[in-house]
Amino acid sequence: MKKIILIVVLLVLTKSFQAQQDPQYSLYQFNQMAINPAYAGSKNALTVVMDMRKQWVSFPGAPTTLGATIHTPVMNNKLGLGLNLVSDQIGARSTTGIYGSIAYIAKLNNKFKLSFGLRAGYLNYKFNFNKVNYKDVNETSLVDLSNVNKGALDMDAGLYLRSNTFYLGVSATHINGASIYNKDYTVLNNVTGLNQNVSSAYVMSTHLFVVAGKAFAINDNLVFSPSVMVKYVSTKTTADLNLNFLMNKRLWLGVFLKQDYGVGMLAQVYATEKLRIGYAYDSGLGSKRILGSSHEIMIGFDFGNYKTKTVSPRFL
């Protein structure tokens, strides 16, 4: 009976982790390629970004994410091409993905451009029960999942509207609802003495994102840029509010609030015209403090010439 209870608990945990199927980012506003394929080519330069996030560092088995994106405009800025690489580890579960993106960039008028983006790739899923520490050392999982190694085609789509001082992105990930695995097992109920059927499934849930930001020039050396991200997944909606300042066209400093979690701060510096380095720290409030703090580091390279003088050309 203990083994049946263990299986049920594991299935419930798998369901509850759907909200964390996608990696979480605090520096997403500086690299929206991570969540929106329509962002490809939007910076009018060949852009390479590498990101590492350690989430909830005090919590055993907490998420660790490594990501890289590359994107550039082509065909006289009418198309954007991009590549995403991601590796995400949560406890005994690890995922690795590689995606290619294409975006059509339409010029609406002298101020606004609207991009339509699609992304497709392969997502590999692994689960190793040997990494699970059981409270009862004599207990083992009835179902051997130690060598689960499955993959599936994954697809995303998005829209991205932008001007020199404003942006609005709408995107959806896992729009094809990829099924990573689906297995049926027969177990013996020690109470009734009868066999009992148990199903184990993992399906990617569609994540919807809405991201918007606006830049306000306070003076020649100070820009105020608030932004918001709303995310919807599995009937749950959350929002992030960011208040950022660009100083001397060189240094970004900001604070942010994550709904139902906590607060954080970020910084990004343009070390050179082509190199930028970012860091974010966040921590839970109230009962979420037990999870510990999170740290994120980002390094970006922008290989291109910014010919148009705007309020914050290298960000918006």
Image (cartoon, helix red, strand yellow):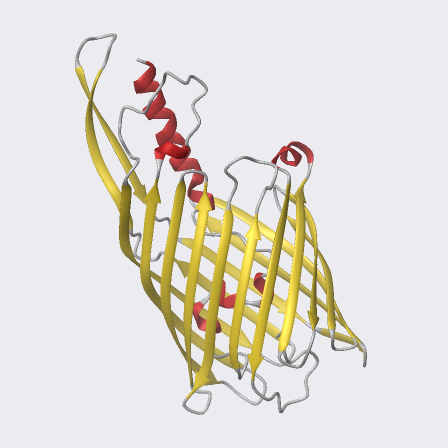
Q: Quadrant of the C terminus?
A: bottom right
The residue drawn where x is 25% and y is 7% is: 191
Q: How many marks?
A: 0
Q: Position of residue 176 (x, y in %)?
A: 30, 57
- Taking 25 as reference, is 137 left or right? left
Q: Quadrant of residue 290?
A: top right
Q: Position of residue 150 (x, y in %)?
A: 27, 48
| Depicted 1 relative to depicted 268: above or below | above
Left or right relative to 227: residue 97: left
Residue at 27% x, 23% y is 142
Determine the residue positioned at 69% across, 47% down. Answer: 263
Residue 304: give x, y in percent of width and height.
Answer: 56, 86
- Residue 142 vs 48, above or below: the answer is above
Q: Is residue 109 visible?
A: yes
In depth, the one of 140 and 266 nearer the eye is 140
Query: In this rendering, would 60 be left or right of 227?
Result: left
Nearest the viewer among 98 and 19 is 98
Residue 98 in the image: state x and y as whole percent: 36, 63
Assign the N terminus to one quadrant of the image. Answer: top left
12 over 88 or under it: above or below: above
Q: Residue at coordinates 59% horizontally, 67% vertically from top-left?
A: 299
User: Is residue 235 visible from the viewing direction of this image?
Assistant: no
